[in-house]
Image (cartoon, rainbow, N blue to C red):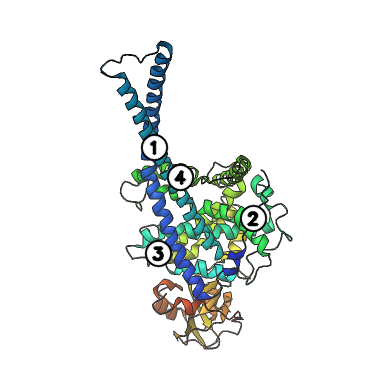
Amino acid sequence: MKKNNKTYQTARLSAIPNMASAVSKKISLFQQQHRKVVEDATAFYQQYPLDIDQLRKYKKKLNAYAQQIEIIEKYKKEHGVLPQIAGQKSPEKYLHQLYMYEQNDKKAFTLLRQQMAIAQTKRYENLDHLTDNMLDLLNNQRIFSQFLGTLVLSTPLPDEKIRCVRNEKFKPIYIAGLVVALFEQIRITHGFKNRYLVEAMSDMFADPKASFMDIEQNSLSHEEMAAYREEVLKPVAKAALLLSIGSYSPQVEDIFAGDRYRLLSQQERELLVATIKIQSTAYLKLGIGIPPQRFNTHQEKLDYTEYEKNKLEFMLSFFSDENNDNCELQRLLKIPVVYSSFMISTKPEFDYRRIYDAYDTIRKSAVNNELDQNYSQLFLAMVGRFPIGSGIYFFNPETESIEQAIVSSLYPDNPHQPICKQITRRQLKSMTQQEIIVPVANNIFFESARHKSGYDDEYFTLKYQNSFVWNANEVWEVQIPALDFWKKDGTRKVCTAPMPKANH
């Protein structure tokens, strides 16, 4: 691959949001942009085959005109007069009509190609803008936590009719965020052997172990970050965003048979997965592809085409069958896809308590070699046992009562000890900007904590009905304003005081 020596624009990096309100606005913006990307794809699948068919018809007619004109002109050149044509009184008039028809169809052909190029450029730009806005929210752990947590907390409740439709629309954004974050962890700890990545990232970083996903401010220079985003992170994010875009094609709609969320048979499921991959690949190659541009020289065009072609082939490797060059990318993708099926479910029947099973499912799948063990370990360390945006109950020694909290940060020091915002005090709504770390001994999700809590089994049975977690979506933006929740002062307190001894 030819090394790109372009100069990158770094001004955007200075405008990345840092206040909770600014991040929320950004999330709202790219959710709108993602809807536009879906609309673009739906229109592409409907219109592109028609346009291609029309281009073929124009080509066929133009070839026929050209052949007839050539025959007539050749005859005139050889004999000095136009030939008599069956069914035509005037060969001169007929030849004039041929030229006129040819000219009109050439104009129509050129116009249609221009319209297709404009539509392709628009699709490319819409995806590019969405990716830029999404990557702004992966600039450090604090922003990323708000980004991912807001998506989860904004999902509809289990019994809401719009849940499947809305979750289906936003699941690709959730997956893409996790893919980029996991990609960064793998880059720092294990590295990649993929040819494109090796070439693109050679000499890119002053410190190859420096991460843009630090807690607050990453140590990458603006020049490093701009190059990393453009050459690596944007192609990765775009591929992740388009993984299931093929589900909006007519071929997949036929498999759904009018119900996108019905339970499929194993045979239907296999056909669905294969068809989505084919159609997603087609959209990336034909719908996005390499957008046309104007150039001053032929060499500029060649350099641009080679540069964009390398990036496109890299993105397409995410959709290809697994091989020696893309196996790392395929293993990376599988983990966020599995995790998202718990967190952003599109199943008609959904119990929110299933999200707390995601950690163990990935861990067991890694043990069984169904998922990459090293990558899974990195991923689980990032998300923790208790997903961001999930609700927990914990015993607070300060109030000597069981309080509610919502997981508010990723990257816990211990995956079993979530970083949370406490939202009740003495079981009344209350919230500060400080985060708390809840140890296993204080988290009543764990049986050992319940036994040590000072509360008897009957209390837990009556009070919690054996459900020791809660759905934070029920109070989100109703009792818990998003902007208040995401405001953090940077301090964290650990609940370490002893549990009560007396029964209640």
Q: Amino acid at mark 4?
A: Ala
Q: Would residue 381 appear left or right of 390 to someone viewing this image?
A: right
Three-letter amino acid code at the position of disc 2: Asn
Residue on which the image places disc 2: 374
The residue under the point 51% across, 73% down is 22
- Give the answer, above or below, for where 161 lies relative to 417: above
Of the two numbered discs 2 and 4 on the same chain, state the one appearing first in sequence.
Answer: 4
Marks 3 and 2, Cα distance to the nearest angstrom?
Answer: 30 Å
Residues packed near mark 4 inside 10 Å, few (<14), some (14 to 19) or many (20 plus): some
Q: Residues within 10 Å of mark 3 (few under 14, many from 20)?
A: few
Q: Which mark is residue 24?
A: none
Looking at the rendered image, the disc whose residue lies closer to the viewer, 3 or 1, is 1
**How far, Cα to Cα, is label 1 from label 4?**
15 Å
User: Label 3, label 4: how many angstroms apart (C-alpha)?
Assistant: 46 Å
Question: Can you give x and y, in whole percent of width and height, for residue 194 in the image?
Answer: 65, 46
Q: Earlier in the sequence, mark 3 or mark 1?
A: 1
Q: Position of residue 340 (x, y in %)?
A: 48, 59
In three-dimensional space, the C-alpha distance between marks 2 and 4, rounded to whole angstroms, equals: 43 Å
The residue carrying mark 3 is 351
Label 3 and label 1: CA atoms lie apart by 58 Å
